Image (tube, grey):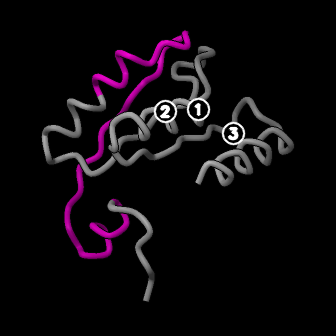
Amino acid sequence: MVQAFSNLMKNILDGKFVYTGELEPHKSMDLSEVISWAKTLKETGKIVAANVTDNPKSVGSISSLVASYIIQRETGLEIIYQLRCSDRNRLALISDLLGAAALG
C-alpha cells in the first residue's frame, strides 16, 4: 500500500477527482500578488494544490523553489514545485533537488 505524504496524493489514492491551480511568479522578488492568488485558490475550498511555474514563457523570474516555499508557508496551500530541465544541466538539477529536499 502506498502511503500518502500530501493532501494531493491522499485525494488521488482515495479515487477522488482533484482540482489544482497554477501560480505564475513574476520577474521580481515581490510575491504579494501571487500569494493573494494562492489565498483565493485556497478559499474556494475546491483546489487541492497549486503548481508554481518555473520561468514561465522562458523568461527569468524568481526561483520556483523559493516561490513555492514562501507561498506554501504564507498561505498553507499545498504547492507542487515545478522544475524545468530545459535550461539546467545535471549539476544544476541536482542542486535544485537537494535544496528542495532540505526545505522539506
Which residue in the structure is indicated by mark 2? 70
Q: Amino acid at mark 3?
A: Cys
Which residue in the structure is indicated by mark 1? 66
Residue at (36, 41) in percent of width and height: 50
85 with respect to 56 (left or right): right
Q: Residue 63, percent across and down? A: 61, 27
Give the residues in magenta: 8-37
Labels 1, 3: front one: 1
Q: Amino acid at mark 1?
A: Val
31 with respect to 63 (left or right): left
Is there a contact, CB below 8 Å, between mark 2 and mark 1?
Answer: yes
Q: Residue 32, percent across and down? A: 38, 16
Q: Amino acid at mark 2?
A: Ile
Is there a contact, CB below 8 Å, between mark 1 and mark 3?
Answer: no
Which numbered dot is residue 85? 3
Residue at (29, 45) in percent of width and height: 20
Vertical relation: 1 (above or below) 15: below
Instruction: Work out whether residue 49 or residue 58 is closer to the camera in this orientation and state it.
Output: 49
What crowding class fits label 1: few (fewer than 14 Cα within 10 Å), some (14-19), or many (20 or more)? Answer: some
Instruction: Give the CA separation, mark 3 to mark 2.
Output: 22 Å
